[in-house]
Amino acid sequence: MSKQKKLAPSILSADFVNLERDITMIQNAGADLLHIDVMDGHFVPNLTLGPPIVKAIKGIATVPCDVHLMISNPAEFVDAYCDAGADYLTVHVEAATHLHRVIQHIKSKGVKAGVSLNPHTPLSSIEEVLGDLDLILIMSVNPGFGGQSFIPNTLDRLRRLNKMLEERGLSDQVEIEIDGGAKYDNMAEILEAGTDIIVSGSGVFKADDPVQMVKDMKALLAKYS
């Protein structure tokens, strides 16, 4: 039996003036996670969401908070974001000088540890820490901004990553997440390539009816669970 497939709407595309309204809306519609993109203006060319905002979101969250650190020196901020309420905390392999140490630090806080790879980063860069991970996040766009188009080569990367996990007996331990350009129209091929969690920002929040979109996406996910 395959793992339950999950939907993680990215609040980067929500209406920040009405953030509580939008979060409540997608949670009530059936979202499985809240994907929270943290950007520092250095690792990526954008600036978003410090720990106080994550703490505020946690206060109204009824589903786990999936916090994605797109920042330089992530080791310095693990405590702040874990303490703010992250349920998953993901760092970039490109930004973590001592990746194993950072992963262990996250896990010591009782938080699920994830590692993310940019589109150009080889899968081999995480081979030595696969057994320590709870989540692998594959970027299907170049990180920094919402609304970008899905990079087609990501599908092959997903298939190869699944093979790596299967060969090591880790398929049941590690969830695979995809982030960037995922919408209802391309979800089926992404799921067929082997992903467990789909992040969708503009695909959810910019839909004509975000509530119905979440329900439609969840129905499609159920077919692959």
Image: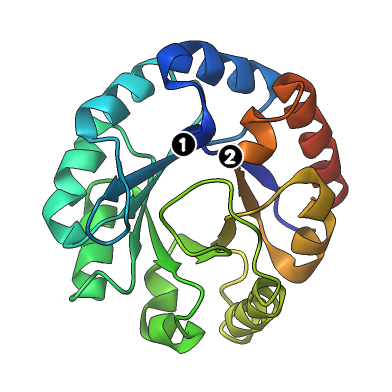
Quadrant housing residue 175: bottom right
Q: Which residue is mark 1?
A: 12
Sequence-wise first label, 1 or 2: 1
Q: Residue at x 79, y 23 (%)?
A: 212
Query: Which mark identifies residue 201?
Result: 2
- The residue type indicated by label 2 comes to Gly
Give the quarter of the figure containing the N terminus: bottom right
**Where is residue 51 shown, x and y percent of the image?**
22, 34
Query: Is 76 positioned to the left or the right of 203 in the image?
Result: left
Query: Is 140 positioned to the left or the right of 106 in the image?
Result: right
Residues at circles 1 and 2 in contact by the CB criterion of under 8 Å: yes
Distance Cα–Cα, label 1 vs label 2: 7 Å
**Where is residue 42 shown, x and y percent of the image?**
22, 59
Disc 1 packing (10 Å; few <14; some 14–19; many ≥20):
many
Give SS at disc 1: helix
Query: Is 108 positioned to the left or the right of 117 in the image?
Result: left
- The residue type indicated by label 1 comes to Leu
Q: Nearer the viewer, residue 110 or 84?
A: 84
Disc 2 packing (10 Å; few <14; some 14–19; many ≥20):
many
Establish if 185 lies above or below 104: above
Q: Residue at x 52, y 11 (%)?
A: 21
